[in-house]
Structures are given as C-alpha cells and as structure tokens.
Image (spheres, rainbow, N blue to C red):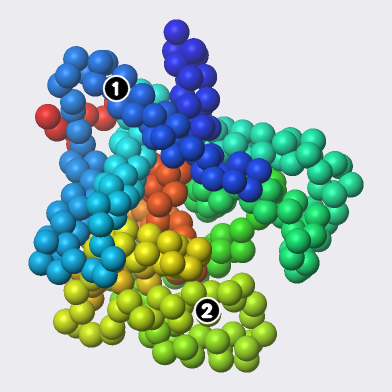
Amino acid sequence: MLNMLKLTYIITMTIAFTSNFMGANTNYYMRLIMGVLWVILWAIRSKGVLKTNRFLRYLLFPWLCIFLFTLFLWMINKPQFFDSSYVTRMCSNVLYCVVATLNAYIGIQFFGKDVLKLSFASLLISIGFNLISVWMTFGASNVLLYMTSVLTANYQYGSVMEAVAKSMEVQGATMALGVYFVYYLFFNCEVDTLHRLVPILLSLVGLYLGFKRVVVLGIAVVICILWVLKYKKNNIRNIIMYTFIVFIILSFGYIVIAKTGYISLIAEYFNVDLMGRNNIYRMAAELFEISPFYLGVGFGYAAKYLYDTTGFAVHSDIMRMYMELGFLPFIAWLWYYIYFIPQKVVTEFGTKFGKVCITITVFVFSTFLVENTLGLYPLHYALTLFTLLQLAVYENNAEYVEE
C-alpha cells in the first residue's frame, strides 16, 4: 500500500512539476488538481483535524499578506485598465503557490525523509519525458547537435535548432532541480560516496538537458555564500544578516539600472545578450517609480498588464515584486524570506539546517533577478521542502508540531 502511495505521489508530482512540455505551457488546472488531490488526502488521513508545524504557517503567512494587501491597494487606487480578470489572476497565482507549499509539507507528513527521493524522481521524470518527446519529434541528429552546442550557440530565429532549444526547455523542473543539485553537492555529506555521487550526477544531467543559464547564476551566488559559511569563526546569524543586506543592495541596484536604462549600456560594455530584456524593462519602467513612498500596483497586475500589452513577461521577478508591492512592502518581502525565516530555522533547528535554509533561499531568489520563476510550482515546493528539511530528516520528532 505504501509503495503504491509513493508511486502515486511521484506521478502526480511529475504532472504538477511540469510547467511546460515541448515548449508549450501545460494546463494550469491539471497541475493545480494534482496538488489539491494531496491536500484532500491529507485532510482525510487527519480526519479533518489538520496538524501544522508553525514553520508551515511562517511560509504561508506572506501569501496571506500579499493577497490582503493587493485587495487593499485595488480598493484605494485601481490601476489603469483594471478589471475583474486581474482579481482572478491574482487569486489563482496565490493559490498555486500556496498549494505548492502545502504539498511539500504534506509529502513530509506522508513519507518523511523519502520525500526527497520521491520529489527528485518526479523532477527527473518530467525532464526525461520531455527529452523523449523532443527526440521523437525532431530526430536524434538534431537533439544530439543541440546537446553539443547549447552552451555556446545562438540559434537563428525560426530555425529547426531554435525550435529544438525551445522544446527542450523545461523551466519549472530545471529551476527546482538546481535546488536539489545544490543540496546534494554541498550538504548531503552523511551518506556514503556512491549514494552521494549518484544524485549529483543525475542532477547535472537533468540541468544540462533542461538548460537554463539563470541556474548557473544561482549556483555561482550559492558558492560565494558557502565560501563565507565554511569559516567557523563566521557566525551564521551575522552571515544571514549580511546576506540580506547584500541582496537588498543587489535588488535595488538591478531595479535602478533597469529603470534608468543603464542596463543596456552595461550589457553592451560586457557583450552580454539581454535577449530583449532591455526593451521589456523600458516598457515596465513606465509602471513604477523609485521612491520610499511608491505604492505598488498589486500582485499580478504588472505581470498580466505587460503580457497583455506587449506579449512579454517582466523577466525579473525582483522588479515585478517591487512594481506590484511597492517600496516598503518589497523590502519587507525580502526581509521575511532572506532574514526572518533563516534566523528562525537557526533558532529552532540549529546551525546546520540554518545553513541549508539560507543557501537554498539565496539560490531561489537569485533566479528571481533575471527570470520569471516566482510562479513556478516546483520552485516553491523545493524552497518549502528544504526550509522544513529538519522535519523530513527527523520525521518522527513531534517537538515542532502543533495543533
């Protein structure tokens, strides 16, 4: 019975984790239903009495605040062209992220530490099935050519290789797999060499097949954090504080150069292909101001408005959240995830799990700088799982579980 339940979890999470397949977005409701199914099973198993760890409530609290604050903003100052579709989009986005967060916690409750292997398998299967479909559609020669050229090639628009590249990209699963790679590479030290090496190699294969350059950025930032963490004289609490300060500076620096247009000059100087982001940022800059008194336009508004009017997403969730939340709430959002929660993990679970939490959080938020990853189901799942890692490793420890 347990093995069948595990298999069901792998299959349903594979569907939930597959945000796009063969270059096309998958059905939102199908992914959401997979997650809701486990919420229902959790309720049935608990006989309606749901026990939640306070850390789960910590992770759900920002979404409640974002939901209520957005409704408040829209009541006092409706943005241009506002209609009911913005409300439904906001609600669906919040619900999606909440369900992803709940699913990670529910997986821990059902399977304990095995949830790491089960969810890891789901990510690999998602990328693997996509590879098989691309292989059958475009042929072995084109896929092999893509694999040998993806790191350096700039495929011509409209070409077969560009179509292969778009079809190979599995954004959600690849981003989340980067989280698992970081964990297995730097923190999974208790197991023997073989059992540590296998998931690392599988992660590398998956990351290569679903290639996303922003994952490389996230890993580079993580390596910098871990280089600081390795010195025992460095207090973990101070490191969390310094990390928060650095990320605030980095985030506002990125917002400022995007707003002013200097990002184009910087990219030209360093010969960096922004892939059209400079044009998107120029359009987005009209929606916000850089001021301590700036009020946001509400969660989901900027993302939907830009897509509806230009056909493009913001391509920086850091800038998107600034636009949608406003100056002070944006700082509060960063503070909560990068400072408050890791500090709480250190207090409750110890230094070891605090290091995992801050490292994984920084990786996830690094992807927010230059990509649309905020709404990715598997990324929120992974962030929750590794924040609550202590519960997964010591699943029978009821000390931190409350009614």
Quadrant in which residue 400 is drawn? top left
Of marks 2 and 1, the one in the foreground: 2
Q: Say left or right for 266 vs 107.
A: right
Residue 279 bears which disc, if any? 2
| Residue 108, above or below 54 | above
Residue 5 % position (x, y): 45, 16
In the depicted view, which residue is nearer to us: 49 or 169? 169
Which residue type does callout 2 highlight? Asn
Residue at x 44%, y 49% (from the top left corner): 376
Which of the two discs, 2 and 1, labels the residue nearer the N terminus? 1
Question: Would residue 335 be visible to someone looking at this image?
Answer: no
Q: Say left or right for 371 vs 134.
A: left
Question: Would residue 72 be visible to someone looking at this image?
Answer: yes
Which residue type does callout 1 highlight? Ile
Residue 253 % position (x, y): 39, 83
Q: Say left or right for 163 vs 32.
A: right
Quadrant in which residue 158 is drawn? bottom right
Residue at x 49%, y 90% (from the top left corner): 262
Q: Say left or right for 223 vs 390.
A: right
Residue 40 bears which disc, if any? 1
Residue at x 67%, y 39% (from the top left corner): 130
In the depicted view, which residue is nearer to us: 95 or 246? 95
Residue at x 79%, y 36% (from the top left corner): 136
- Disc 1 packing (10 Å; few <14; some 14–19; many ≥20): few
| Residue 228, above or below 21 | below
Residue 276 % position (x, y): 58, 74
Task: State which quarter of the image contains the N terminus.
Answer: top left
* Element class at badge 1: helix
